[in-house]
Image: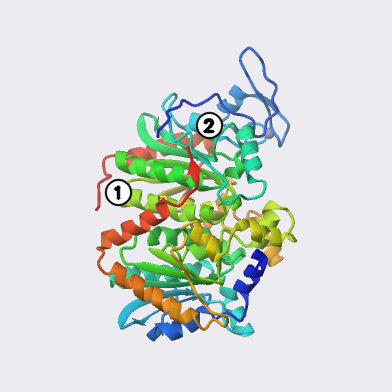
Amino acid sequence: MNAYKKVQAARSNQRPDAKKYIEQMIDGFIELHGDRRFGDDPAVMTGLGFFESRPVTVLALEKGDSNEERLRRNFGSANPEGYRKSLWQMRQAEKFNRPILCLVDTAGAACGIGAEERGQGQAIAENLWEMMGLTVPVFSVIIGEGGSGGALALACANEVYMLEGAIYSVLSPEGAASIIYKDAAKVEEASEALKLSAQDMLRFQVIEKILPEGADYELAAPSIKAAFSDALKRFDDLSPGEIRDQRYKRFRRLGGEKE
Amino acid sequence: MEKLRRFKSPNLRLEHDFSKNAENARVTAVCPACKREMTDSLLEQEHYQCARCGHLFKMSARQRIRFVLDEGSFFELDSLLASTDPLEFPGYKEKLNQARISSSEKEAVITGTGSINGQACAFFASEPGFMMGSMGAAVGEKLSRLFEYAEEKRLSVIGYTVSGGARVQEGILSLMQMAKVSGAVRKHSDAGLLYIAVLCDATTGGVAASFAMQADIILAEPNALIGFAGPRVIEQTTRQKLPEGFQKAEFQMEKGFVNKLCKRQEQKEILSRLLKLHEGDQGERV
Ligand SMILES: [Zn+2]
């Protein structure tokens, strides 16, 4: 499959949205709305529930599963209040010592006048800052699109996984085409050049694991569940400080510079 | 691997015509707004702002260093760190070479230590002439090392940002620098240490969504463009015309994201006073 086909597949409406995985994975999920500052952003879903009988915080970028829902949720492109909603829940998780499970599916953070007025950059920056200091374990799965800082704001995790059909990228291939090639039509070339497949991410050590999803996504939920389950067990024995340091070191080694 | 290097003579290539006088190597600068001709020493005297029309000249990282830090106090760190081409992105190697030649720098940020009116600090300045100050792996590494070094030596960090954001040609690895640098900023902060950012024209994208917005005190140069998405992208996406002054430093202060506007001629004094205000009370918080 060429890179642009992968991009299209990762964006397909056929792919299960975050909500479906939450339903299959989390028992007794209670969605909690609002950022306590401005409003409630439907592009971000946050809440509490039990994962294998243990209380967890769930943070998700939710694209919606019908045309109506997709519009309402802005196709999973979050506004500052969405990131601040997740920030509030991260702080709650830290207070009550709950692991955080994140499901990431977004083309990127919302782009618009309102988003800028309310500090899109600051909102993402604060999430990154907060996540790098959390002493509870955080695990993220890219389930479809992992686009730019808008995805990273829920992916500064101790471990990051990708479904095999997902993509992860510094910006959309369309954005790259217009910035690098000055030609929005060169999106296929840009997709190729960006190296955005799960295999690429594994090679760059940006993710820990590729999760099988099956031809009809029938394997996706069980493999996400297995990955979270395994990770939670492995992090059980770490102290809060060790959990934070592991996350710092995980990102600290990522580069590709030389002297 | 710390390389110490004194700053070079001011690099005035950004907006200026070169006409070297062999004797004192003076550069004649022409104001792009009103076409007034100036010598480099006059430009420096006028704080890199045209006294006739008020135009703010783009400043290179070396000019920032010379402008803010005490003379001769700057010691550069990690001057040899440079990006490679991890994605083998078409055309990137050539682009890097061009940027190195046109800016006379190895990368898009200069880091080091120095003093401001006698007070020591760690310092960084983005280099706008190097791929618009964009952040790839080398920029992320240099900044992470600077914050780690400052934490170890218990120094405040003062940083001048100018950046188009994450460097697209390094793909996902440049996105990861946002998390990496954020981690180093957080650690420095958790040690009870001060970080002041001065946001300059333009600070956007992944830099505006990470270390530019994570400082204890955020200053901005008047009229600087500061935002996550660039204005052109917003106009294209929303098909709306942007209001006058949108995303400018004044707008960002009004919206609550910038603490103070800071003209060039007052920057050194303000930074010096802020350092003094934080002297002595920087204690470890665990
Ligand atoms: Zn002028």
The part of the image, by quadrant, that contains residue A234 is bottom left
Q: Residues within 10 Å of mark 2 (few under 14, many from 20)?
A: many
Please tell me which residue is depicted at 52% across the width and 58% down the height of the picture. Answer: A121
A188 or B14: nearer the eye? Answer: A188
Image coords of residue A225 (percent x, y): 41, 78
Mark earlier in primary sequence (2, 1): 2
In this rendering, does residue A119 appear at all? no
Q: Which mark is residue B192?
A: 1
Please give the label number shown on residue B62. Answer: 2
Element assignment for label 1: loop
Which percent across, then down, holds residue A177?
A: 69, 57
Q: Is residue A30 above or below residue A5?
A: below
- Residue A193: name its quadrant: bottom right
Q: In the image, is residue A26 above or below residue A110?
A: below
Residue A58 percent location from the top left of the image: 41, 76
Image quarter (top left, top right, bottom left or bottom right) of the N terminus of chain A? bottom right
For this view, does B121 lie left or right of residue B236?
left
